Image (cartoon, rainbow, N blue to C red):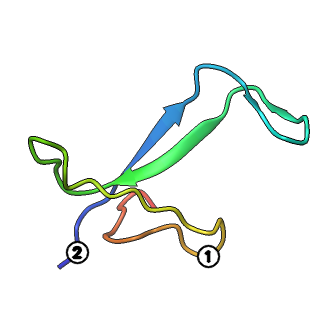
Amino acid sequence: MSKTVHTQFFHAPQPLYTRRGATLPSPVLAYETWGTLNADKSNAILLFHALSGSHHAAGHNPAI
């Protein structure tokens, strides 16, 4: 059973400064959501990937 994935974007309100002194003036973080949060939001899972390979954890994103 395939679920539709929704791509969302977080626009950071301020610059991001790295340890090496670089500055990202307007960082944007893309993330995907699927399913529905329950009332107490206890069914949320945060998943990180290794910045390589596929970043899709599940489902199908019709925009890609």
- Under circle 2, the secondary element is loop
Q: Position of residue 55 (x, y in %)?
A: 52, 67
Gap between marks 2 and 1, in whole Å? 20 Å
- Pointer 1 local density, CA inside 10 Å: few below 14, some 14–19, many at least 20: few
Q: Position of residue 62 (x, y in %)?
A: 35, 61
What number is the disc on residue 2? Answer: 2
Instruction: Determine the residue positioned at 46% across, 50% down.
Output: 31
Q: State whether residue 37 is above or below residue 34.
A: above
Q: State whether residue 36 is above or below residue 64.
A: above
Pick the front one: 32 or 20: 20
Report the residue that reaches farthest toward the left. 39
Q: Is residue 36 left or right of residue 15?
A: left
Indicate the quadrant where residue 53 lies. Answer: bottom right
Tell me the mark number nearer the camera, choosing from 2 and 1.
1
Q: Which residue is mark 1?
A: 53
- Pointer 2 local density, CA inside 10 Å: few below 14, some 14–19, many at least 20: few
Instruction: Determine the residue positioned at 75% across, 26% down.
Output: 25
Q: Amino acid at mark 1?
A: Gly
Q: Is residue 24 left or right of residue 61?
A: right
Pick the front one: 4 or 13: 13
First in sequence: mark 2 vs mark 1:
2
Pick the front one: 29 or 40: 40
- Under circle 1, the secondary element is loop
Pick the front one: 62 or 46: 46
Q: Position of residue 42 (x, y in %)?
A: 19, 51
Indicate the quadrant where residue 2 lies. Answer: bottom left
